[in-house]
Structure formats: C-alpha cells, structure tokens
Image (tube, helix red, strand yellow):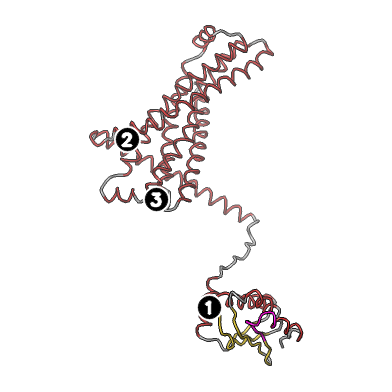
Amino acid sequence: MAEAPAIGEQARTSSADPAFGLEQQGDIWALHGELTVRTLGAALPRLLALKGDALALDLSGLTRFDTSGAWALLKLREQQHAAGHDVTLHAQSAEQKALVARVEQAIPEVPAPDATRHGIQHYLAVLGKAVVGVGRFLAEILAMLGVFLARLAHLARHPSQFRLTALVYHADQVGWRAVPIVSLMAFLIGVVLAFQGAVQLRQFGTEIFVVDLIAISILRELGILLTAIIVAGRTASSFTAAIGSMKMREEIDAMNTLAIDPATVLFVPRILALLITLPILGMIANVMGLFGGALMSWIELGISPAMFLTRLIEDTSMDHVLVGFVKAPVFALIIGVIGCHAGMQVGGNAESLGQQTSAAVVRAIFAVIVADALFSVFFAMMNI
C-alpha cells in the first residue's frame, strides 16, 4: 500500500504550483495538469517522495506531457527499482507511452564496474593490447617505408615524373628555415659542454682535454642527435598537419580519382628533402657546436682558437665524424616516414588532426633516440 503525504503538505504543494496535481485515489496516484519542463521543478520532488511496495500512477488526467515529464517518471521508476519496488503506469495514451519509450532509449546506460580491473588479468590484458598496438604500428611504418622506396625506384626509372619543384620547396621548408634554430642550439650546447668540462677538468689540471670532450661529444653524438630532435619537432608535425589537412578536405581522394598517386606526390618529395637536408643541418650543427666550445674554452680556460684547432685536428679521429653522419639518413627516414604515416591516419575532424600531429612528434623523437642508442651499442661492439 502506498503511503500518502500529509494532507497539509499536499495542500501546500498543490497551491504552490496549481499547474501540476497529484492525488491519491484508492491504491492509485492520479496525476493531472501539466507534467512538463515548466512544472518539473515542483513535480519531481513530489513524485520522488512517493513510497510504497508497488506504486500505480494514472496518467489520464495529464493535459500536457513532454520529455521532461517522461524523464521524471523514469527517475521515479529507477528510485523504486533501487529499493526493490515497482512502478506501474495506468491509462497511458499511445503518445505518452511512445514518448516514455523514446526517452528511456535515449538515457545512456552506465556500465557496471569491472570487478577485475585491478586484478592481474586486467594488467596482462592492457599489456597485451599495448604490445599488439606497437606491433601493428611498426608494421604500418615498414609498409610506409616500402611504399616510399618503391615510388623512389619508380621515379629513378622514370625521371620525367619526378617533381623537382616540390623537392626544392620542401628542402627550403625543412632545411634552410631550420638553420637558425639548429645553429643556435648547437652553439649553446658547445658553450655548455666547454664550461662544464672546464669546471670538472680544472680539478685535475687537465683542462686541455676539454677539446677532446667537445669534439667527441658533438661530432659523434650530440650534434646530429639534437639536430634530428629539433627537425622531428618541426618537420614531423608539419608533414602530419599538411597531409592530414588534405585528407580532411578529401583532396587525397580527389587525387586518387584523377589517377594521381599520393605517395609519389606527397611522400617522396618530403622524405627525400629530409634525406638531403638533415646531413647538411648536422654538419652546420657540428661547426657551430665546435665554435661555441672554442669560444668558451678561450674565455674560461685561455685556450686560443689556434691551439683549439690544432688539438682538434691532431687528436680527433675521422671515425667520430663518420659515425655522426652515418646516423643522419636513418634519422631522416624515421622522421619523414612517421610524419607522413601520421598524416594518413587523420580522420575527418580537427580533433583527429591535433591528436595525430602530437603523436607524430612524440613518436618521431622517441624513435630517433632509440635509433641513436642502437647505433651507440653497435659502434661500441664494433670498436668504432
């Protein structure tokens, strides 16, 4: 049996909002007036205040009924079900019944909490998905690299199809425009290495070895590595943004319709421009890094530029220079392929473009650092 609210309370509530009424008629609660968004503020507390093992509501007296009213009835049903009780709706019109059903379908279902989310199975599942995702990504990158090499071989056999203007344009974008930031970065790295090396080596009276420290660090590792990281930040993002924007605007679909190969037009000039310009940028970084180191050595240790140059030529093996330049083409391929691959993964919205652009930068920088570590291990094992 449902429990009725106090008579005084019912009278006060009814007078407060005469547009909606709620009366008990035997075992059934009769609703009359409007149950709409306008009366929801007063009607919802009264509905939720109803208690009973089995509530029965008569809707025949409602003059107006909208989605807010349907939501209020569903909210009452949810409350009663949580308490182990039931709610029955009587005298519904076809429109009211259809409206309640549509609102019920539109309410999102809250997923039940996963009882195993903190168990070992959950963590193993997450790890397995991550491994599968990495494997799939590596397979896609290798496929993209294969497409680039195949198109490059085709253009080598048919040089008339090669787009020299696009190559020059992208070489200017990724190479020439990166010279200022690369030069400044390398110069400051050389200054820092010389200053820190002077501070440490002065304790042992071996300040002259700061030349060897600067030369080996910059020529072998830091020059090309930091250059590749800067280029990855600039170029991978620009490749992704440019190709992704074309994909969003369906320009790539239009190219396919016109029998224009997107890989030949978009991928080859960009990656080839990186292959040409990254070694040049690495050479500029080496020169500026040595210049910064020589300047700080002169200021801090009194090592003249002539003495610095003499020590550099006599005690620095060409192997260090070759090790640095061998890495440049590999880094260029990594950055270019990852940037173009991310651009092709862009969906049809701006959010996807932003996500892929950020992901391309992170992946390119991470891949460059991993490749540099593998090179270091390999050359150490080969005693180079």
Q: In front here: 324 or 198?
A: 198
Residue at 45 percent across and 38 percent down: it is 236
- Relative to 341, residue 77 above or below: below
Q: Secondary structure at mark 3?
A: helix
Pinpoint residue 214: horizontal percent, then vertical percent: 55, 18
- Give SS at disc 2: helix
Within 10 Å of the Cα at label 1, are there few (<14), some (14-19), or many (20+) other Cα atoms?
few
Q: Amino acid at mark 2?
A: Ala
Asked whether disc 1 touches disc 3, contact meaning CB atoms under 8 Å apart, the reply is no
Is residue 221 among the parts visible in the rendering?
Answer: no
| Crowd around label 2: few <14 · some 14–19 · many ≥20 (10 Å) | some
The kind of residue tagged 3 is Met
165 and 139: which is toward the camera? 165
Asked if labels 3 and 2 touch by Cβ distance under 8 angstroms, the answer is no
Pick the residue in front: 259 or 213.
259
Q: Which of the two labelled residues, at mark 1 and mark 3, occupies the earlier sequence position? A: 1
Image position, residue 205 (x, y; %): 66, 10
Of 50 and 119, nearer the camera is 50
Verify whether residue 18 appears in magenta. yes
Secondary-structure class at tag 1: helix
Residue 287 visible in the shown view: yes
For badge 1, the amino acid type reads: Ala
Residue at figure coordinates x 29%, y 44% from the top left:
261
Q: Is residue 160 magenta?
A: no
Tag count: 3
Q: In whole angstroms, how far apart are the C-alphas of marks 2 and 3?
A: 21 Å
Magenta range: 15-22
Residue designated by label 2 = 166
Q: Looking at the image, is mark 1 or mark 2 earlier in the sequence?
A: 1
In the picture, measured across the screen, residue 42 lies left or right of residue 332, that is right
